[in-house]
Amino acid sequence: MDSENREEVIKKLSLALQKISQQMPVSFIPEVGMNIVFALPDAKTNMDVAGVEGRIVKKGDRVFPVGDIKFGASDHIARIVLTAMKFDPEVRSAANIRFSEEAVSKLEELLFEVRSFDREKEPAGVSTMDWGVAFCCKLDDVPDIIFDRGAMGKEPMIRFLADDPQTIANNIIMLFERINNKN
């Protein structure tokens, strides 16, 4: 059963990655790179979360996944989904894109549930993603979008959360289309 779940996770993540690689603009890729992840049901560690090894980067005018999809390939984005799963176990996928005020505004217009946290208020000795995601979640409620405006040495970021990676890919492309059409 576990190997079937792992194969299904990789298959679904591969399809979402293909859509992102073909349709997402390079302008959405943060300086630190992007990743999209998908966790096994009941995931507990980053080894239970598949992601793109080496992240997704800009290569000229192309969106380029540096490596293969593997379990344990992501730490940062995997922590986002693992924390979200503590609030809602159905939310098993996450991705990050470059922050812009326009993107946040368009996401709100599209009626996504958008929440943010302030990195300056992060308690000492905790992981930013563990704290920031938990700060934005409620008892059994995980928002669609979590963003922050950065801090000294920390790039601002928008994070998408959903039950599966195809939903995330579709939501990112919908955001791009809304920004591109200026509607």
Image (cartoon, helix red, strand yellow):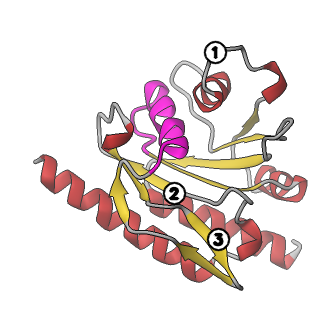
**Which residue is rendered at x = 84% and y = 41% of the image?**
149
The residue that mark 3 highlights is 173
| Residue 123 percent coordinates (x, y) | 72, 14
Q: Nearer the viewer, mark 3 or mark 2?
A: 2
The mark that comes first in sequence, 3 or 2, is: 2
108 relative to 170, above or below: above
Image quarter for residue 131? top right
Question: Are discs 3 and 1 less than 8 Å apart at CB?
Answer: no
Q: Nearer the viewer, mark 1 or mark 2?
A: 1
Residue type indicated by callout 2:
Ile
**Which residue is rendered at x = 51% and y = 32% of the image?**
84
Residue type indicated by callout 1:
Gly
User: In the displayed image of the protein, which residue is found farthest to the left?
Assistant: 1
Whether residue 118 is visible, yes or no, is no
| Residue 100 percent coordinates (x, y) | 85, 56
114 relative to 182, above or below: above
Task: For mark 2, give the secondary structure.
Answer: strand
The residue that mark 1 highlights is 125
User: Spatial distance from mark 3 to mark 1, Cα to Cα?
Assistant: 36 Å
Left or right position of 20 against 128:
left
Question: Are discs 1 and 2 less than 8 Å apart at CB?
Answer: no
User: Spatial distance from mark 1 to mark 2, Cα to Cα?
Assistant: 26 Å
The mark that comes first in sequence, 1 or 2, is: 2
Q: Sort mark 1 into few (<14), some (14-19) or many (20+) by Cα contacts within 10 Å.
A: few
Left or right position of 149 against 28:
right
The residue that mark 2 highlights is 36
User: Where does the magenta region start and end?
Assistant: 74-92
Q: Which of the pair 113/68 is nearer the observer? A: 68
Q: Sort mark 3 into few (<14), some (14-19) or many (20+) by Cα contacts within 10 Å.
A: some
Whether residue 154 is visible, yes or no, is yes
Q: Which of the pair 64/161 is nearer the observer? A: 64
